[in-house]
Structures are given as C-alpha cells and as structure tokens.
Image: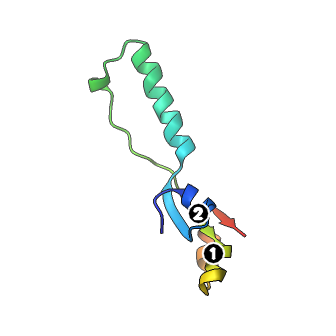
Amino acid sequence: MYPYREYVDAGGLMSYAPNNVELFRGTATYVDKILRGARPGELPLQQPTKFELVINLKTARTLGLTIPPSVLGRADQVIE
C-alpha cells in the first residue's frame, strides 16, 4: 500500500491517496487569493476531499494475489 499513485504506476500493488490534481487546484486558489491581497495566516486550512484507490493487477498476479471483485469495483483505476 502506497501513499501516492505514482508508486503504483511504477509497479507497486495499490495506493489510496488524495487526488493530486485536486490538491494542485486548491494550491492555485490559495496563490490567487494571496496575490490579490489576502493574508496567508487568515486563509482557512483545507484538507483533501477526493481520494483515489488505484490497483495494479499485474503486480497482484506477480505476487500470486487475487483481488476480490468487490474491491476492484470500488477502485478508481485498475492498471492491467
């Protein structure tokens, strides 16, 4: 289990992590507010709201694991 999906893309078994695109969009919003004069210390803290489950089936097969269909059905992406 990995904290970033990039590890799964590189051959790791699975990850459950925040969606990086959503995190970067949130960062851009913060930068925009700061450039428009907002004080960074007064901006609310935001936490990730969208998480992704990514499973690498090729790695699972190599390890001799069978991922249940119920888990595969919940995955946001399955790498074959």
What is the total number of numbered labels drawn onto the structure image?
A: 2
Q: Which mark is residue 8?
A: 2
Q: Is residue 7 visible?
A: yes
Determine whether the residue tagged by mark 2 lies in a helix, strand or loop: helix
Residue 68, image x, y percentages: 61, 83
Near mark 1 (Cα within 10 A), the count class, few <14, some 14-19 or many ≥20, is: some
Q: Residue furthest top?
A: 37
Q: Quadrant of residue 61?
A: bottom right
Residue at image coords 53%, 42% = 22
Residue at image coords 52%, 37% = 24
C-alpha span from label 1 to label 2? 9 Å
Residue at image coords 49%, 41% = 23
Q: Do residues under tags 1 and 2 come within 8 Å of each other at their CB atoms?
A: yes
Q: Residue furthest left?
A: 41
Residue 16, image x, y percentages: 50, 62
Residue at image coords 63%, 70% = 56
Near mark 2 (Cα within 10 A), the count class, few <14, some 14-19 or many ≥20, is: many
Q: How is the image coloured?
A: rainbow
Determine whether the residue tagged by mark 1 lies in a helix, strand or loop: helix
Q: Is residue 79 above or below residue 61?
A: above
Q: Quadrant of residue 30?
A: top left
Q: Residue furthest right?
A: 80
Q: Is residue 68 visible?
A: no
Q: Is residue 10 above or below residue 62?
A: above
Residue 65, image x, y percentages: 59, 85
Name which residue type carries label 1: Thr
Residue 80, image x, y percentages: 72, 70
Name which residue type carries label 2: Val
Left or right of 48? Residue 14 is: right
Q: Which mark is residue 59?
A: 1
- Who comes first in sequence, dot 1 or dot 2? 2
